[in-house]
């Protein structure tokens, strides 16, 4: 397994963050398609090539691109054709980075499998999968809004090789209070990328309400509406059993990136340095466990 870092988690200019990721010992990076230093809907190919060269000069590859576009994903408005077109354009631009993974939140999958809305979201994700496959990529749905069982059923309904999973164990723990290792065993055939993040589930919550609040006003609005439901913490200090989790990833044959994401905290650089050290130890601890 390889360690990556989401550059924006370092909270510094993009090129500075790329160099810092190398210094911290990462082998790859993930970037947001839309961020203060990057606009993959409008930036020129020359600018994107220069960014790729900066990564290459630091010995790094792009583990993935994050195409989160805010809002309610592909469910509101139903199918969201404008979002699908923007996703297609980001896929096209991502080819310059030589990555095969585009991660995203797709919104909350409708609970009623017999509803028209559910059928429209399935059809749209199938179209997205076709676009991804045409670009030699996989659109990886980030875990969190649905239980692992619900997401598995949705993926079976979409039934396209161009749609996979970006496994975020912290989201599953914080929102769903799910067992991350068991989620891996359920979703293993679809996992193409992972985020390394940790968290604590404090109170049961309605996942739709959580993600709707994020879509409308971010974490501040969620807390204002509900109080604290969960907490992101430093890697290794939350509810995830990282030994079991990495063993489960190995069981399903995953040998890709563990890309560190740190969305909170006053000292992201120190937290990410600690996370790299922690993951290195866990990778060594588990590397012979499945043999």
Image (cartoon, rainbow, N blue to C red):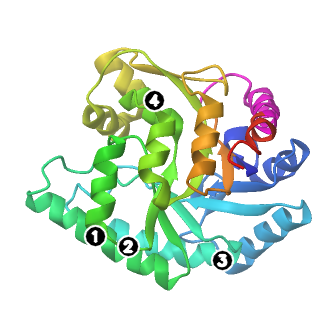
**Magenta region, mostly helix, strand or loop?**
helix
CB contact under 8 Å: marks 1 and 2? yes
The relative height of residue 221 versus residue 212 in the rendered view (above or below) is above
| Residue 79 appears in the rendering | no
| Residue at 82%, 48% in the rendered image | 26
**Which of pointers 3 and 2 indicates the residue nearer the eye?**
2
Q: Which of marks 4 and 3 is in front?
A: 4
Q: How far apart are marks 4 and 3 (CA)?
A: 39 Å
Residue 124: image tag:
1
Q: Observer-nearest residue: 214 or 201?
A: 201
In the depicted structure, whether residue 164 falls above or below residue 264: below
For residue 136, side relative to residue 185 (left or right): right
- Return the disc, 3 or 2, that comes first in the chain's sequence: 3
Which region of the structure is painted magenta?
263-281
Q: Distance between the residues labelled 4 and 2?
A: 27 Å
Q: Which mark is residue 173?
A: 4
**Quarter of the image holding residue 215?**
top left
Tell me the distance, in whole angstroms, between the alpha carbons under discs 1 and 4. 28 Å
Q: What element carries label 3?
A: loop
Give the percent coordinates (x, y) of residue 208: 26, 37
Q: In the image, 270: left or right of 138?
A: right
In this rendered view, identify the residue nearer to me: 270 or 175.
175
Q: According to the image, label 3 marks what residue?
A: 44
Is 272 contained in the magenta span?
yes
Residue at the far bottom in the pictured view: 134
């Amino acid at each position: 397994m390889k360690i990556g870092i989401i550059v924006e988690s370092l909270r510094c200019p993009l090129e500075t963050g790329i160099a810092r990721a190398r210094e911290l010992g990462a082998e790859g990076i993930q970037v947001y398609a839309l961020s203060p230093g990057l606009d993959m809907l409008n930036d020129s190919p020359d600018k994107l090539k220069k960014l790729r060269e900066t990564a290459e000069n630091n010995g790094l590859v792009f583990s993935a691109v994050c195409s989160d576009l805010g809002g309610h994903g592909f469910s509101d408005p139903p199918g969201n054709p404008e979002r699908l077109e923007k996703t297609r354009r980001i896929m096209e631009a991502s080819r310059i980075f030589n990555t095969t993974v585009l991660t995203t939140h797709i919104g909350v999958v409708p609970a009623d499998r017999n509803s028209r809305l559910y059928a429209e979201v399935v059809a749209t994700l199938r179209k997205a999968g076709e676009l991804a496959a045409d670009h030699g990529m996989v659109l990886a749905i980030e875990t969190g809004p649905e239980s692992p069982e619900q997401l598995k059923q949705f993926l079976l309904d979409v039934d396209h090789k161009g749609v996979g999973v970006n496994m975020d164990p912290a989201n599953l723990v914080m929102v769903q209070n799910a067992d991350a290792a068991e989620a891996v065993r359920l979703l293993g055939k679809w996992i193409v990328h992972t985020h390394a993040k940790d968290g604590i589930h404090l109170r049961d919550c309605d996942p739709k309400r959580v993600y709707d609040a994020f879509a409308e006003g971010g974490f501040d609005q969620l807390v204002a509406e509900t109080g604290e439901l969960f907490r992101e913490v430093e890697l290794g200090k939350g509810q995830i059993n990282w030994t079991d989790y990495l063993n489960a990833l190995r069981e399903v044959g995953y040998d890709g990136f563990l890309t560190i994401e740190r969305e909170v905290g006053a000292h992201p650089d120190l937290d990410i340095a600690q996370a790299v050290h922690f993951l290195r130890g866990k990778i060594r601890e588990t590397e012979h466990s499945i043999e």
